[in-house]
Image (cartoon, rainbow, N blue to C red):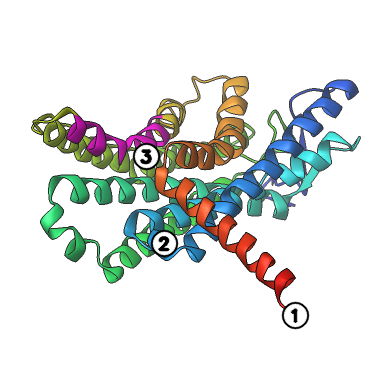
């Protein structure tokens, strides 16, 4: 496409992680196994929360949303990576590139906002337990979850529109594993001041503000826990938010460092590592962290397995 001597390409070439065929085969196995584990782990969390009435609580409502986001997030990029590992021609059309960028930004932003909502839930549960039921009513948590999804989608739509409108003047090789904002901006052959402003604004909305809210919530939580006189009480209170705090620490750090510097002081290699960490590692680690550190999830899994075992025995013994 051409307009006023500026050109927009019809497809992009993704350089990926390596051009060596043996390395690509190894990466295919690694990423394929990670993708399956992510689907199984997050799918199991969603299933347990739906089947076990004891998990129909605000914290697990948000956890269910987080698992849905993780499944969608990893599915927005990893299947294409797997295809490119076995193909000689690693291209992606302009339309598919825009779609991938939108969905990765939408689900990534929604995850950060959901983590802030989960921090508010832990704040109310520990710092103001008498008003917890009223504050985290079904209507309230539905509104928090809906706002997280809506803001994530709107933010992604704006950033995608501003990024994909950039002409590249024939440059179509992306030094990346997927269509990502900073990689696409590097190809632009026009002024990118507007894009830099949008990237910073987007980072403030879905990263900085949620991160500040989480920090404030946990500052109050820590202060409340320190006022508990018994050691057992402190451990119990901290145990209710340890899993969430682990995920928050893992999720916000690298993203803040990367996306709060729009002039791209970060290298292309660093951008790849950040995208792989959030698009591949985080969705796989989240269910492991929440299940291994959560007694209620383990108990729910045990109850579901025992229920299935008993139902099978009844069918066998029945005439």
* Magenta stretch, residue numbers: 232-249
For residue 241: magenta? yes
The CA span between labels 1 and 2 is 54 Å
Residue topped by disc 3 = 244
Report the side of 139 relative to 226 (left or right): right
Residue topped by disc 1 = 319
Identified at 71% across, 76% down, the residue is 318
The CA span between labels 1 and 3 is 49 Å
Report the side of 229 relative to 7 (left or right): left
Give the x, y percent position of residue 145.
37, 60
Give the x, y percent position of residue 305.
59, 56
Q: Is residue 243 placed above or below 55 in the rendered structure?
A: above
Which label sits on residue 44? Answer: none
Q: Quadrant of residue 119?
A: top left
Say whether disc 3 or disc 2 marks the residue closer to the N-terminus.
2
Identified at 60% across, 46% down, the residue is 41
Residue topped by disc 2 = 150
Mark 2, Cα crowd under 10 Å, few <14 / some 14-19 / many 20+, is some
Say whether residue 64 is visible. yes
Q: Quadrant of residue 74?
A: top right
Which residue of the protein is positioned furthest toward the bottom in this rendering?
A: 319
Give the x, y percent position of residue 105.
52, 47
| Nearer to me, 7 or 70 | 70
Q: Secondary structure at mark 3?
A: helix
- Asked if labels 2 and 1 touch by Cβ distance under 8 angstroms, the answer is no
- Asked if labels 3 and 1 touch by Cβ distance under 8 angstroms, the answer is no
């Amino acid at each position: 496409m051409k307009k006023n001597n500026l050109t927009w390409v019809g497809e992009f070439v993704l350089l990926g992680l390596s051009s060596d065929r043996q390395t690509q085969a190894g990466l295919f196995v690694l990423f394929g196994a990670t993708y399956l584990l992510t689907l199984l782990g997050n799918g199991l969390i969603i299933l347990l929360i739906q089947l076990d009435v004891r998990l129909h609580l605000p914290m697990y409502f948000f956890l269910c949303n987080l698992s849905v986001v993780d499944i969608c997030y990893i599915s927005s990029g990893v299947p294409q990576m797997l295809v490119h590992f076995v193909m000689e021609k690693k291209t992606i059309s302009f339309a598919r590139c825009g779609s991938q960028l939108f969905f990765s930004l939408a689900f990534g932003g929604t995850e950060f906002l959901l983590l802030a909502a989960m921090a508010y839930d832990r704040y109310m549960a520990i710092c103001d337990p008498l008003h917890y039921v009223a504050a985290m009513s079904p209507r309230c948590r539905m509104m928090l979850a809906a706002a997280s999804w809506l803001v994530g989608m709107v933010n992604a739509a704006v950033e995608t529109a501003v990024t994909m409108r950039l002409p590249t003047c024939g440059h179509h090789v992306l030094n990346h594993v997927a269509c990502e904002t900073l990689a696409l901006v590097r190809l632009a052959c026009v002024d990118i001041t507007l894009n830099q402003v949008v990237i910073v604004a987007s980072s403030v909305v879905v990263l900085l503000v949620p991160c500040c809210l989480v920090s404030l919530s946990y500052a109050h939580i820590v202060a409340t826990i320190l006022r508990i006189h018994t050691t057992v009480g402190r451990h119990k209170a901290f145990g209710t938010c340890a899993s969430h705090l682990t995920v928050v620490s893992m999720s916000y750090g690298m993203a803040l460092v990367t996306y709060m510097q729009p002039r791209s002081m970060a290298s292309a290699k660093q951008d790849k590592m950040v995208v792989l960490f959030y698009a591949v590692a985080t969705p796989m680690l989240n269910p492991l962290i929440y299940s291994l550190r959560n007694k209620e999830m383990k108990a729910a899994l045990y109850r579901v397995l025992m229920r299935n075992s008993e139902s099978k025995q009844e069918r066998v013994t029945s005439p």
